Image: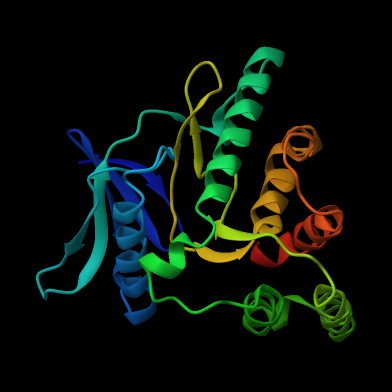
């Protein structure tokens, strides 16, 4: 097996025509095992769609019979973070991104039918939990400022028209693969997927692919007037994950 990727929770290996995502030994726990299982269920349920996702997905168990990873057909492609764009390949990439978000929008209530996964309040659950885990990295004033921003947004959030759909939950320049022409060949690592605010994924586009890519998508999609503000809010919180 050849190591082709490494992360905080897992390594990815290539073995013949397959990729194997294996949790680090110290990351094999109930939470991460459940995420692997849910990711496999989702990808198998989505295999009939035209989304650029992993195929032939199945869980991997260790010698104790515990789920420790997943196997899927290897996807040829270059991580966007390692790709040098020209004007033309950037256009091709933006077209592929637009197609991806149009496809995601068409499966609006898909996850509810595919998985028994509770709705998450991104601001009050994901962000607050990140603050708790990383309190030592922030001053008291900074923590209070972050919490104040969350509170302001969640109050506005009640009055917004929010477009919800199945979202990837971790759109970044490592989880999208492209071919030599800039077209997307794969969107990988769906472990954080959920049925939620589309603006959350679009914030990932803004942070990792730039304002040009985001504008291209927004100009071709019929989103509500509040979308820009929600995207900017989520983008402003991205540093909490680092």
Q: Quadrant of the N terminus?
A: top left
Q: Please tell me which residue is depicted at 62% across the width and 22% down the height of the picture.
A: 84
Q: Is 174 placed left or right of 190 in the picture?
A: right
Q: Is 47 placed left or right of 220 in the picture?
A: left
User: Depth check: 2 or 71 in front?
Assistant: 71
Q: Position of residue 71 (x, y in %)?
A: 23, 50
In this view of the protein, can residue 169 be seen by the observer? Answer: no
- Counting labels gives 0
Q: Say if 202 sits above or below 112 in the image.
A: above
Q: Say if 102 sits above or below 105 in the image.
A: above
How has the structure been colored for display?
A: rainbow
Q: Position of residue 42 (x, y in %)?
A: 36, 59
User: Depth check: 232 or 161 in front?
Assistant: 161
Quarter where residue 95 is shown: top right
Q: Please tell me which residue is depicted at 22% across the width and 45% down the height of the picture.
A: 56
In this view of the protein, can residue 110 be seen by the observer? Answer: yes
Q: Say if 11 sits above or below 114 in the image.
A: above
Q: Please tell me which residue is depicted at 56% across the width and 22% down the height of the picture.
A: 182
Q: Say if 91 sits above or below 103 in the image.
A: above
Q: Position of residue 96 (x, y in %)?
A: 57, 29
Q: Position of residue 28 (x, y in %)?
A: 31, 73
User: Depth check: 205 or 3 in front?
Assistant: 205
Q: Is 154 placed left or right of 152 in the picture?
A: left
Q: Is 13 placed left or right of 201 in the picture?
A: left
Q: Quadrant of the C terminus?
A: bottom right
């Amino acid at each position: 097996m050849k190591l082709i990727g490494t992360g905080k929770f897992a390594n990815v290996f290539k073995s013949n025509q397959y990729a194997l995502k294996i949790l680090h030994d110290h990351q094999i726990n109930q939470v991460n095992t459940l995420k692997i299982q849910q990711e496999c269920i989702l990808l198998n349920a989505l295999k009939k769609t035209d989304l650029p996702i992993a195929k032939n997905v199945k869980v991997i168990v260790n010698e104790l019979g515990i789920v420790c990873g997943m196997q899927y057909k290897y996807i040829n492609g270059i991580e966007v973070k390692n790709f040098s764009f020209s004007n033309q390949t950037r256009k091709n990439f933006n077209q592929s991104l637009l197609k991806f978000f149009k496809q995601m929008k068409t499966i609006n209530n898909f996850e509810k039918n595919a998985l028994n996964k509770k709705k998450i309040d991104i601001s009050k659950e994901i962000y607050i939990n990140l603050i708790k885990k990383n309190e030592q990295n922030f001053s008291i004033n900074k923590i209070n400022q972050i919490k104040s921003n969350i509170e302001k947004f969640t109050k506005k959030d009640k009055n917004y028209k929010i477009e919800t759909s199945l979202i990837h939950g971790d759109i970044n320049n490592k989880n999208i693969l492209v071919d030599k022409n800039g077209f997307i060949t794969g969107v990988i690592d769906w472990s954080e997927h959920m049925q939620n605010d589309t603006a959350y994924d679009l914030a990932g586009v803004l942070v990792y692919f730039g304002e040009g890519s985001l504008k291209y998508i927004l100009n071709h999609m019929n989103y509500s007037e509040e979308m820009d503000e929600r995207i900017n809010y989520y983008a402003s919180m991205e540093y909490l994950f680092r």
